[in-house]
Amino acid sequence: MPYKVALICGAAIVVLMTSLLLMAQQTPTPDTSNLGLVGDRFKPLTWDTMSPPQKTMTMNLLTGPRRGMGGPFNVLLRSPEMGDLAQKLGVDMPITEQVYRVLHERRSLTDAFTALVERAHKDELQGIG
């Protein structure tokens, strides 16, 4: 009899631990109420006004390594297929990023220029052709 109780308790613990592990691995749903998009030329989009491809790109950004929409993504959302592909391939846009930071994050021009000049060399043509 104690053997059966131990077996049942062990099985219950395994089921409980597996459930907890699966719940911990699930990514929480990102908050889409305030995406943090800015822009003067292109009015910042809201989740409710986005097309399905724009929502796909947004979710990929929020759940991917960037975990946010800071930077030139308000503009890239106008061509979400291209923006999503650029984000997935890790395409850097250093000049656009620094202009964004100067205009919207009050970064000094000196700091922006220094960041561009001192950034690590990247072979943009690697793997092409």
Image: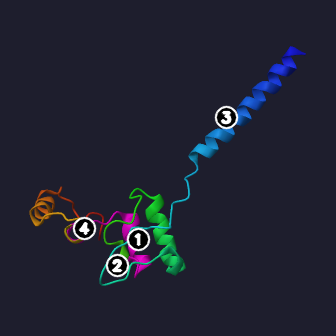
Pick whichever of labels 2 and 3 is earlier in the sequence.
3
At label 2, counting other C-alpha atoms closer than 10 Å, the crowd grade (few under 14, some 14-19, many 20 or more) is some
In x, y percent, where is residue 24? 58, 43
Q: Mark 1 points at which residue?
A: 85
Task: Report, in whole angstroms, how far the alpha carbon at label 2 lies from the one at label 3.
Answer: 44 Å
Pick whichever of labels 2 and 4 is earlier in the sequence.
2
Q: Mark 4 points at which residue?
A: 97
Between disc 1 and disc 3, the foreground one is 3
Q: Name the residue under label 3.
A: 17
In x, y percent, where is residue 88? 41, 65
Q: Is residue 87 left or right of residue 50?
A: left
SS assignment at label 1: helix
For the residue pair 87 and 110, the one nearer the viewer reads as: 110
Task: Report, in whole angstroms, how far the alpha carbon at label 1 lies from the one at label 3.
Answer: 37 Å
Say which amino acid is labelled 2.
Val
Q: Give yes or no for contact between labels 2 and 3 (Cβ–Cβ under 8 Å).
A: no
Residue sticking out furthest to the bottom: 41
Say which amino acid is labelled 4.
Glu
Q: Give the range drawn in magenta.
A: 75-101
Q: Give me the residue at 11% from left, 64% from top.
A: 113
- How many dots with numbers? 4
SS assignment at label 4: helix
Residue sticking out furthest to the left: 110
Q: Give me the residue at 21% from left, 72% from top.
A: 103
Q: Mark 2 points at which residue?
A: 75
- Residue 127 against residue 27 in the figure, above or below: below
Residue 90 in magenta stretch: yes
Pick whichever of labels 1 and 2 is earlier in the sequence.
2
